Amino acid sequence: MDPVINYPAGYTLDDSGNLKKWHTQKERLRQRLINRLIMRRGVAAIPGYEEAGSRLYTLSRVKRSGRADAAKQYTEEALQPEVEAGEIIRVATVILTENEEGKYSLAVSVELPGGEMLDLEVNDTYGN
């Protein structure tokens, strides 16, 4: 078990910003995938898990013309442990939308075993 990402039980935020307990394995998987995307790779507090997380926070260092490709690469890297564990089959789509204030939105679709698609959305600000 990956203690940085895979909590034994927990909560997530609902659409109104209130805490909501996970009720299904799919909700738990969704939150774990989002955690992998928003956590900064190399900054894990637990020794041995430095590779957990993503490099999405470094997108501001990539030329604007290459950011969409970099976002896809960083997303696939971050979610690769879930592919290896058989939790997801693949990252199907990654769509990056950004504004001039350094904020971005990332829409990600992953394919689950059985062919079902799971959609994720991450909103964040580019780090330095």
Image: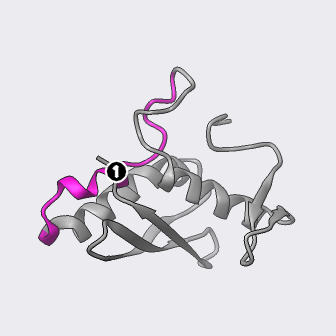
The question of residue 90 being in magenta is answered with no
Relative to the observer, which residue lies in front, 26 or 44?
44
Identify the amino acid type marked 1.
Gly
Is residue 121 shown left or right of residue 87?
A: left
Give the quarter of the figure containing the N terminus: top right
Percent of width and height locating residue 107: 46, 76
Relative to the observer, which residue lies in front, 110 or 115?
110
Badge 1 marks a residue whose secondary structure is: loop
Relative to the observer, which residue lies in front, 79 or 12?
12
Is residue 84 shown left or right of residue 15?
A: left
Is residue 71 shown left or right of residue 34?
A: left
Which residue sits at x=27%, y=57%? 59
Percent of width and height locating residue 128: 28, 46
Residue 32, by quadrant, is: bottom right
What residue did someone put label 1 on? Answer: 127
**Circle 1: is it few (<14), some (14-19), or many (20+) Cα within 10 Å?**
some
Which residue sits at x=62%, y=68%? 113
Looking at the rendering, the stretch of residues picked out in magenta corresponds to 48-65
Percent of width and height locating residue 65: 13, 71
Residue 98, by quadrant, is: bottom left
